[in-house]
Amino acid sequence: MGLQQHEPGSEAGRTPPRADAGFSLVEVLVAIVLISLAVIPLMLAGIMAIRVSSSTHTISQVETVLANAADRVNRAGEGCDYAVYVQAAALAEGWTADRASATYEYYVPGDNSPVELGTWVPGACPGPQRPQGLVQKITITVNSPDDDIQRTIVVVKSDV
């Protein structure tokens, strides 16, 4: 019995491939990495879209409350305190009244000289009652329920 010699290119020296060999660990890892490179950015884009949508909705609500508060103050009769109108705008949105607030200043004209300017003084009115011809500056501030968004508007109110 002698050694058998095989010619190059013949099938006799090769092991036949197995039909159920599957994938190697390296092939599986490469596939996972390639899929991750495509899927992770898509997931991050989806998460960002959800956050932007939520933020846009909150901004919209804050600006709606702000516009409603300014409108309520404009329509209110002349007085010294408009907090109830401002807070009603927040309550109408289903928020607590403390989400909307108002600060006040009133205008004190300068002397009768045409070159002297008047000044804004902190406070709603100069006394316990609103004097005739008073000009008020009402600064309305609205905060979102989560305190992430804050908007402010200034309304000037006068009976002249």
Image (cartoon, rainbow, N blue to C red):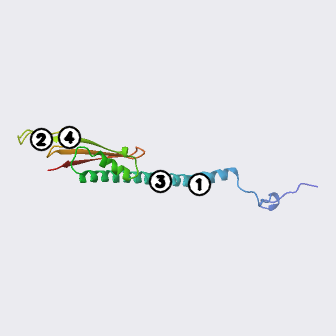
- Which mark is first along the chain, 1 or 3? 1
Secondary structure at numbered mark 3: helix
Q: Image height check: is 142 above or below 6?
A: above
Q: List the residue tagged with mark 2.
A: 109
Residue at position x 41%, y 46% in the image: 145
CA separation in Å, label 1 and label 4:
68 Å
Secondary structure of residue under mark 4: loop
**Horizontally, is 1 left or right of 30 in the view?**
right
In the rendering, at what x and y percent does residue 73 appear? 26, 50
Looking at marks 3 and 4 on the same chain, the residue that comes earlier in the sequence is marked by 3
Sequence-earlier tag: 4 or 2: 2
From the image, tell me which residue sits under label 4. Answer: 125
- Amino acid type at circle 4 is Cys
**Which marked residue is nearer to the observer: mark 3 or mark 1?**
3
Name which residue lies at 10% across and 39% down: 110
SS for dot 2: loop
Location of mark 3 (residue): 50
Q: Are marks 3 and 2 in contact (CB under 8 Å)?
A: no
Q: Which callout, 4 or 2, points to the residue nearer the camera?
A: 4
